[in-house]
Amino acid sequence: MPKTCLFPGTFDPVTLGHVDIINRALPLFDKMIVGIGINSAKKPMFSPEQRMEWFNQIYRNHPEVECMVYEGLTINFCKEVGAKYILRGIRFVSDFEYEKAIADANRTMDKTIETIFLTCEPQYTSIASTIVRDILKHHGDASQFLPVEVIKTLNG
């Protein structure tokens, strides 16, 4: 049975921080599913299809990476796709506290699915999709935070 990991998030937009976490986790798993979660409480700047296309472009030479869109509980999506691991990136201690609470709830719902935390490389700790969206909304240059594939789309 392949070791399948789910990296869930909104990825609105995909940042260099997201790519860093995925790239460093790839050697740990046989298959990586990037799960673009639809959260009805959030109003995304980019469509799920656009975010999926970015990941498909970034990982076009990595057949072990697959991108999917899902709604509902992440733990249920893990069961649906056969993922036994959830990958989460940690930038700050506050991220860990929040993510640990979610991991504990997930473990209560299904003890067979483990959450793995990877800390961000120092140069990516300040990158957050929320900040990048704010820069973009105000017509600032967010290119230093974004993969080339995202920048190409934004520049038309």
Image (cartoon, rainbow, N blue to C red):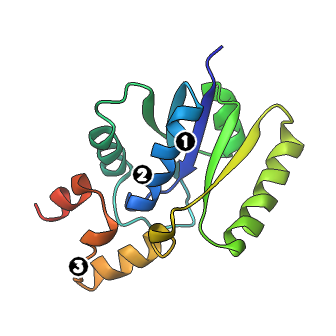
View extreme (bottom): residue = 138
Q: Residue at x 70, y 30 (%)?
A: 84
Q: CA distance from mark 2 to mark 1?
A: 10 Å
The residue nearer to you, when weighing 45 against 100, is: 100
List the residue tagged with mark 2: 19
Q: Earlier in the sequence, mark 1 or mark 3?
A: 1
Given the image, on which type of amino acid does mark 2 rest? Answer: Val
Residue 25's mark? 1
Residue for point 46% across, 68% down: 124
Between the C-alphas of marks 1 and 3, the distance is: 29 Å
Judged from the image, the secondary structure of the residue bearing numbered disc 3 is: loop
Residue 128: tell me if it is visible. Answer: no
Question: Which of the marked residues, 3 or 2, is nearer the chain's N terminus?
Answer: 2
Instruction: Identify the image quadrant of the C terminus.
Output: bottom left
| Element under disc 2 | helix
User: Mark 2 or 1 closer to N-term?
Assistant: 2
Instruction: Note whether 27 is above or below 155 in the view shown.
Output: above
Q: CB of mark 1 within 8 Å of CB of mark 3? A: no
Q: In the rendered view, tell whether residue 60 sits above or below residue 52.
A: above
Near-viewer residue (42 or 61) = 61
Say if 115 sits above or below 113 in the image: below
Measuring from the top left, give residue 83's x and y in whole percent: 65, 30
Residue at the spot x=51%, y=45% of the render? 24
Badge number at residue 141: 3
Instruction: Give the foreground label among 3 and 2.
Output: 2
Q: Nearer the viewer, residue 71 or 151?
A: 151
